[in-house]
Image (spheres, grey):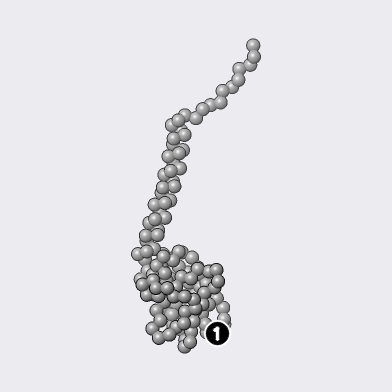
Amino acid sequence: MPPKKAKAKKKSKKTAAKKITKGKKTTKAKKINKVKKIDKKKTNGNGVAPAGWCQNFPANPGDLCQFTPPANATITGIPGVYWPFCGPNGTYLPSPINFLANTQVYIQSDAQDGTYQFVPAPCKQEMTHSVTITG
């Protein structure tokens, strides 16, 4: 008599369904959390970021940057680095920003969390500085 072949155990349909459902719940939860985070960013800000001249500073999306620039001051973006600055109501402010009388600079309301470098001038030591955005 030939030997009997061992049968492989089949997973029940119920067990397979649980794994699929569990995966969908995890994915859906991540999407919901991501949407909530983005919505939160859009309503955050409208505060004032303490942006001392030639210093790194923290900010939230939508914040007014309270720069204290000297005469003939500019901030310049670094090629390839996200430019988080804008004018009132999200108006476009290209790099470099020249600080003239009443120049208002804000953090873009849709800016993602992160640290973004820029170059302020004049400074005692010419170097990059950064704004760290959290929201």
List x then y, in percent, for residue 111.
Answer: 44, 66
The residue nearer to you, when weighing 65 against 99, is 99
Mark 1 lies on residue: 124
Res. 3 image quadrant: top right
Residue 99 in the image: state x and y as whole percent. 45, 83
Q: Quadrant of residue 5?
A: top right
- Residue 124 % position (x, y): 55, 85
Placement of the N terminus among the 4 image quadrants:
top right
Residue at 43%, 80% in the rendered image:
67
Quick check: can you spot residue 135? yes
Q: How many marks?
A: 1
Q: Is residue 70 left or right of residue 126?
A: left
Picture residue at 43% right of the left edge, 39% below the top: 21
Residue sitting nearer the eye, 90 or 50: 90
Name the outermost residue toward the right. Answer: 2
The amino acid marked with disc number 1 is Lys
Q: Residue at x 53, y 26 (%)?
A: 9
Q: Which residue ends up furthest to the bottom in the rendered image? A: 71
Give above or below for 130 relative to 101: above
Q: What residue is drawn where x is 44% and y is 35%?
A: 17
Q: Name the residue at the top extreme.
A: 1
Q: Is residue 41 left or right of residue 5?
A: left
Placement of 74 over or under 27, stated as above or below: below
Q: Is any atom of residue 48 visible in this view?
A: no
Are there few (<14), some (14-19), or many (20+) residues within 10 Å of tag 1?
few
Q: Nearer the viewer, residue 30 or 50?
A: 30
For label 1, the SS is loop
Quarter of the figure that contains the C terminus: bottom left
